[in-house]
Amino acid sequence: MNIYQHFRKEEHHFIDQVIEWRESVHTNYSPRLTDFLDPREQEIVKLVIGDDEDVCVSFFGGASFVERKRALLYPPYFQPEEEDFQLALFSLHYPRKFISLTHRQVLGTLMSLGVKRSKFGDVLMKEDDVQFLVAKEIASYVQLHLQAVGKTKVTVEEKPLTEIIVLNEQWNEATITVSSLRVDAVVAQAFGASRQHVQTLIANGLIKINWKIVEQAHAECKEGDTISARGLGRLKLFSIDGKTKKDRFRLHIGTQK
């Protein structure tokens, strides 16, 4: 069976990487820790590993509710602990009485440190508390070089994972109907925007399906997809519930703005 036929073409390179990780565990009979993976990548890892009796996989990113997690592939004899995922949790200290930081500002600053995105986990924000997770191998580098977010001076303090900000993900659920499963049609209907506006966002690289930039407005959405549209919000396609009498697709979705 050709495993690639079940995935989008742009995911094939990542599948090759997962196969390489799996073979490494087979060959060396020792654990293999990955960088942080987004939820779609985690799903691909589970599907590729499948029912392999010689390779197990676990995911952890600091808490059960976070999106980005590291994967640990390991032989059956190994019993993974939280420490095996090599995570560091940092809390940002800043003049919160006078300044408000945004998720985009914090993530943008982390990206400017010259470290690839896969070394960073979730950025967590609740009221004026800001935390973020990193791979432990870059923790000292981040602590040394992260001195400001924009023009705001900050200091970072490492915290135990037991002090992580607890977030509850909430979706505004609804049922919509669309003429097709094209991403421009689905996003436009979900957020009450024009398809022309959505197509402009796509042209500017501002819409992602499963954390990957969408390049074509005719890209098709599938059940389980998470779609983000800059300036509009996030959309989760929970299910495709058949068609209406007017031959439109009926979708069960959740949105966050």
Image: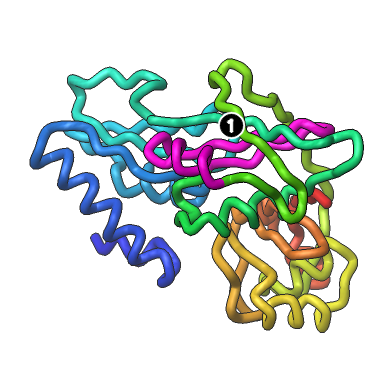
Residue at x 70%, y 54% (from the top left corner):
241
* Residue assigned mark 1: 90
Element marked by disc 1: strand
Q: Is residue 137 magenta?
A: yes
Q: Position of residue 101 (x, y in %)?
A: 79, 46
The quarter of the image holding the N terminus is bottom left
State whether residue 53 appears in this view: no
Quarter of the image holding residue 96? top right
Instruction: Give neighbour class at mark 1: few <14, some 14-19, many 20+ (Cα, 10 Å).
Output: many
Residue at (63% x, 24% y) in the render: 164
Spot occupied by residue 97 in the image (x, y as percentages of width and height) = 90, 34
Q: Identify the residue at the far left of this view.
A: 27
Taking the magenta stretch, the answer to whether it contains residue 138 is yes
Q: Along the horizontal axis of the image, is 30 left or right of 171?
A: left
Residue 196 drawn at (x, y percent): 82, 83
Residue 21 horizontal side relative to residue 116, left or right: left
Residue 153 drawn above or below residue 93: below
Q: Which residues are magenta?
A: 121-145
Q: Is residue 221 above or below residue 86?
A: below
95 in relation to 230, above or below? above
Three-letter amino acid code at disc 1?
Answer: Phe
Depth order, front residue of 73/112: 112
Q: Position of residue 19 (x, y in %)?
A: 24, 53
Display coloring: rainbow
Where 86 sits versus 80, above or below?
below
- Residue sitting at x 62%, y 18%: 163
The answer to whether any part of residue 6 appears in the image is yes
Q: Residue at x 86, y 43 (%)?
A: 99
Query: Total number of numbered labels?
Result: 1
